[in-house]
Image (tube, rainbow, N blue to C red):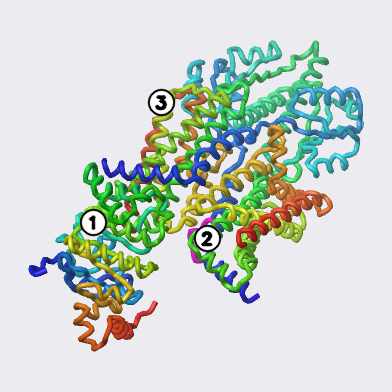
């Protein structure tokens, strides 16, 4: 026990005396929470649009004013010829062009129907879809306004209720994913690199020839990162609650319990990588390319898994963070209890046991 | 010149001799580039709906048919119990609930108005917005139909028909948008990491000391480091651009490829300057990695690759504009997807040249200081 | 060595890190073709002094000239005229013997026939010709050290600085290493060497002893033994180093 204590203390010294590593350990999660919470949303505000107004009548003017006053759009320019549209797009900062044809108001009132053309810069399909939806909503509202004056309305009015996230914050989606990402980063990347570093420097041999049990050496290497991960989890949770206004709906105890399993899983991955990698550079690249990117891609927090081709959907099942992400989302946001997530927890536990077993086995082989 | 040649030969030998690093440099980015765009598809399709129908009338049935026929939605449950539908949302089997109240048809015809509840799982805000907006649009169209049926005579319904066109990417293929951006990320990561780590490694082992006592000039040494990684950057870009983007995804650049390479050339100088800068501040590879990773993460997230810059608040936009990655991704998309010419990207050129000077001079200044 | 030509001259050289005087007010001269031993306990300031003389570190005060060039202004000219080798690092381990020779030769501006001749000569002298395509990492330490020394003088510098060149090497290899040093000195290359081995100190023409950043003694080994009335350099070192305030 005394030995373990002195080893763990040494590891903490390493970590806390290195300001640049601390930047990674604590600066990154905090920066990410801030960015994801406040900067990275898909809700687009003040997108620059151009209106090509051939009509220039009261209806088109009314609609243009409504669009210009909406939070989503900023009216950059009103143009009057088709050729100017292309020029506007090529400059790059115009995402949408609205075209009102000649005799717009006349058609609307006398033919009962008039057409508006929306041209979106679909080189970014997401922005295009979103902006088109915004513009359609404004036009639809306007239409309902003018129809209200007509008698004998027959209409179905949809009442939309946003569950779990009534204000449509992006953070609700990102925070659980971020927790998974941060833990993985600390445990896999930092652990594997710090072990390989000791190998490279030759200090690992000194530790291994000391009368300490090799297992203690490894546990001592892993333990500080275990606690640092829990500390980071706490920081991320506190920031989510205080800064982003996300409430934790489920059991905090359950959340920490599942997180501990996930941390163990990530630590054994880090250990495994440190066994394979010969140099710090290699350890880092394996961790980054082999662990981090798949996590970002396949855990479901950045990209919807149901949109992927079937083979990739199958691959996503072996990524531990996917299961962890589902669990955290369920506990934090939906507030579900253990009964709803026991299956995911079980899968994660099995993965952890498997990885722990493999990494210890590998470690022993290297020793003998 | 002769000394630079000697340095270059040494660097290339070391890079190509490193059997664990080489596949990482060349193969991994290519595999990622192949897989990632397939995964990174935000297009909202297959929204799973659960319908709670308390009415079961002809009118309700017709409306539901319209919704399921739109192609965006997949009916996963049809029942008359809201609680049951809600459990489907809880277990992620359904994304959206449509609840049709009792006497829906009767009230609609008698009172001329009827409400309908749509409950959306809004954890993913964007998906929720678009899903709800699709349903609303279908209902609005359905309303028009109803009106048209009834108002055959009498007042005109005043209907604004919205026709939407998608330029530059008519089929809304997400890959066309993502591949060029992801390519930029890989060039950036390989460039900045490899360059900073390589120099710090010489610091850690101590070989840099040996170099410092030789008469070679600082700029010789720096050029000797920058040129190999510049070439590797260009090679990776070319493989990704012609091998993956063109052959696999069929992305044909609309604009001038030479212009693109011109931009890449300057961009790499700026980026390697950044790697150099990190290496002057870091003493160990772990530090270099931590610092490089910290900035790369922010650069990538703030580059507009995954979420549009238009959606950012003003302060975040400011950060995005201090981010060299943003500019290259924009240029890439402008040249490849829209065929923009030099005139359109002139400011981008100026900015990246500015970055190149800033990073490199800062790095050289700091480099002198540390060895002084 | 009758007409003494000075190649290193140091007067009142001082290096201060914050409040700490790593090197305080040292003065000495080294002559052409001499083997100059630079001794001292760990932390006495040897490495700092060498770094200043090699142009790696700027002195806080004092005057020093190496190969006739000023250590403040002409560091680049100094670098062209010196060789340097340390125990910590010598060569690129992931390059072969031949590649290391060519690389450092190229850096010192050797090329074509001259580089070719030097390379052949060097490989022959060290009996490394059969191993020229092996990675340096695979060589035994002693070979690495000899190769590193030969490469450090490949450009025939005026002075070569050796910072604990024989650390961790067996006695036979050390002996061979000193043969190389004598050979270089005979050719007129001045050797400036730091060491922990007192038997090696006996090989030097003159030795200086650094204690707490200052030079405590400077003379030939024979004179020093006389002065302190002891039998070996070991005892001289012990007497002087015992008085040190600084320890590691």
What is the count of numbered marks? 3
Is residue A278 visible in the rendered structure shown here? yes
Was residue A18 drawn as part of the magenta stretch in this picture? Answer: yes
The residue that disc 3 covers is B258
Gap between marks 2 and 3, in whole Å?
A: 46 Å
- Determine whether the residue tagged by mark 2 lies in a helix, strand or loop: helix
The residue that disc 2 covers is A199
Q: Nearer the viewer, residue A129 or C60?
A: C60
Q: Quadrant of residue B166?
A: top right
The chain that hosts pointer 3 is B
Toward the bottom, the furthest residue is C229
For disc 2, the neighbor class at 10 Å (few under 14, some 14 to 19, many from 20) is some
> In this picture, is B126 found above or below A287?
above
The residue that disc 1 covers is C79
Was residue B100 drawn as part of the magenta stretch in this picture? Answer: no
> In this picture, is A170 found above or below B343?
below
Position of residue B40 measured from the top left corner of the image (x, y, whole percent): 62, 35
Gap between marks 2 and 1, in whole Å?
A: 35 Å
| Figure quadrant of the C terminus of chain A | bottom right
The chain that hosts pointer 1 is C
Position of residue A83 measured from the top left corner of the image (x, y, whole percent): 48, 16
| Figure quadrant of the N terminus of chain A | bottom right
Left or right of B241: which side holds A290? right
């Amino acid at each position: 026990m005394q030995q373990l204590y002195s080893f763990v203390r040494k590891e903490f010294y390493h970590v806390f005396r290195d300001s640049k590593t601390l930047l990674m350990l604590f600066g990154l999660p905090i920066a990410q929470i801030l960015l994801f919470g406040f900067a990275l949303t898909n809700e687009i505000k003040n997108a620059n649009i151009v209106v090509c107004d051939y009509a220039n009548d009261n209806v088109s003017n009314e609609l243009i004013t409504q669009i210009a006053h909406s939070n989503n759009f900023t009216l950059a320019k009103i143009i009057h010829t088709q050729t100017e549209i292309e020029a506007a797009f090529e400059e790059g900062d115009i995402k949408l062009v609205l075209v009102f044809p000649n005799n717009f108001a006349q058609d609307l009132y006398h033919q009962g129907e008039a057409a508006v053309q929306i041209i979106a810069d679909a080189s970014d399909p997401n922005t295009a879809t979103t902006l088109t939806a915004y513009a359609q909503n404004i036009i639809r509202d306007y239409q309902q306004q003018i129809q209200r004056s007509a008698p004998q309305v027959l209409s179905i009015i949809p009442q939309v209720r946003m569950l779990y996230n009534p204000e449509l914050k992006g953070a609700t989606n990102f925070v659980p994913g971020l927790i998974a990402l941060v833990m993985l980063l600390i445990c896999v990347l930092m652990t594997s690199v710090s072990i390989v570093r000791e190998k490279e420097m030759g200090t690992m041999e000194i530790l291994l020839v000391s009368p300490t049990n090799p297992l203690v050496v490894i546990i001592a290497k892993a333990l500080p990162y275990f606690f640092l991960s829990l500390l980071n989890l706490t920081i991320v949770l506190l920031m989510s609650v205080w800064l982003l206004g996300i409430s934790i709906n489920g059991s905090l105890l359950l959340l920490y319990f599942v997180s501990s399993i996930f941390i163990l899983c990530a630590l054994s991955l880090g250990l495994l990588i440190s066994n394979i990698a010969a140099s710090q550079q290699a350890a880092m690249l394996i961790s980054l390319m082999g662990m981090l990117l798949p996590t970002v891609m396949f855990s479901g927090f950045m990209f919807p898994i149901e949109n992927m081709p079937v083979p990739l959907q199958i691959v996503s099942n072996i990524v531990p963070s996917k299961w962890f992400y589902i669990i955290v989302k369920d506990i934090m946001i939906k507030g579900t209890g253990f009964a709803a997530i026991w299956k995911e927890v079980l899968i994660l536990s099995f993965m952890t046991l498997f990885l722990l077993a493999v990494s210890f086995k590998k470690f022993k082989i290297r020793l003998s | 010149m002769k000394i630079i040649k000697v340095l270059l030969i040494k660097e290339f030998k070391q890079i190509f001799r490193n059997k664990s690093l080489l596949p990482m440099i060349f193969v991994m980015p290519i595999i990622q580039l192949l897989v990632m765009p397939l995964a990174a598809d935000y297009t909202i399709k297959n929204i799973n709906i659960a319908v709670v129908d308390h009415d079961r009338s002809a009118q309700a049935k017709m409306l539901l048919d319209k919704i399921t026929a739109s192609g965006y939605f997949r009916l996963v449950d049809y029942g008359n119990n809201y609680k049951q539908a809600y459990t489907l949302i809880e277990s992620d089997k359904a994304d959206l609930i449509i609840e049709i109240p009792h006497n829906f048809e009767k009230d609609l015809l008698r009172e001329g108005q009827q409400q309908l509840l749509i409950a959306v799982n809004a954890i993913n805000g964007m998906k929720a917005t678009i899903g709800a907006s699709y349903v609303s649009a279908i209902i609005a169209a359905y309303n028009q139909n109803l009106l048209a049926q009834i108002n055959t005579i009498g007042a005109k319904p005043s209907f604004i028909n919205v026709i939407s066109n998608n330029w530059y990417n008519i089929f809304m293929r997400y890959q066309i948008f993502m591949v060029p951006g992801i390519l930029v990320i890989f060039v950036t990561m390989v460039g900045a990491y490899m360059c900073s780590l390589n120099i710090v490694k010489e610091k850690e082992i101590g070989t840099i000391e040996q170099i410092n006592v030789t008469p070679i000039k600082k700029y010789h040494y720096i050029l000797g480091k920058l040129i190999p990684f510049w070439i590797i950057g260009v090679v990776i870009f070319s493989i990704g651009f012609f091998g993956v983007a063109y052959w696999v995804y069929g992305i044909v650049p609309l604009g001038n490829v030479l212009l693109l390479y011109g931009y890449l050339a300057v961009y790499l100088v700026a980026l390697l300057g950044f790697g150099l800068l990190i290496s002057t501040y870091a003493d160990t590879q772990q530090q270099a990695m931590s610092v490089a990773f910290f900035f790369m993460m922010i650069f990538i997230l703030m580059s507009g690759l995954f979420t549009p810059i238009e959606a950012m608040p003003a302060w975040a936009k400011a950060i995005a504009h201090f981010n060299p990655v943003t500019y290259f991704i924009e240029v890439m998309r402008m040249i490849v997807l829209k065929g923009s010419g030099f005139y359109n990207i002139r400011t981008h050129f100026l900015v990246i040249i500015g970055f190149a000077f800033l990073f490199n001079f800062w790095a050289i200044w700091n480099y002198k200081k540390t060895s002084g | 060595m009758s007409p003494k030509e000075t190649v290193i001259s140091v007067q009142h050289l001082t290096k201060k890190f914050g409040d700490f005087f790593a090197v305080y007010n040292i003065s000495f001269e080294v002559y052409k073709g001499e083997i100059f031993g630079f001794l001292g306990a760990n932390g006495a300031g040897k490495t700092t002094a060498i770094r200043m003389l090699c142009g790696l570190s700027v002195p806080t005060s004092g005057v020093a000239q190496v190969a006739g060039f000023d250590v403040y202004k002409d560091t680049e000219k100094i670098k062209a005229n010196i060789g340097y080798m340390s125990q910590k690092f010598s060569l690129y381990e992931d390059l072969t013997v031949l590649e290391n020779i060519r690389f450092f030769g190229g850096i010192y501006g050797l090329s074509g026939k001259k580089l070719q001749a030097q390379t052949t000569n060097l490989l022959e002298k060290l009996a490394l010709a059969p191993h020229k395509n092996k990675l340096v990492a695979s060589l035994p330490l002693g070979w690495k050290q000899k190769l590193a020394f030969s490469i450090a003088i490949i450009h025939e510098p005026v002075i070569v600085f050796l910072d604990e060149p024989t650390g961790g090497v067996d006695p036979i290899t050390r002996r061979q290493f000193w043969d190389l040093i004598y050979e270089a000195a005979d050719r007129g290359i001045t050797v400036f060497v730091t060491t922990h081995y007192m038997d090696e100190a006996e090989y030097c023409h003159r030795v200086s002893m650094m204690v707490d950043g200052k030079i405590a003694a400077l003379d030939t080994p024979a004179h020093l033994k006389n002065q302190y009335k002891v039998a070996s350099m070991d005892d001289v070192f012990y007497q002087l180093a015992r008085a040190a305030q600084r320890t590691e």
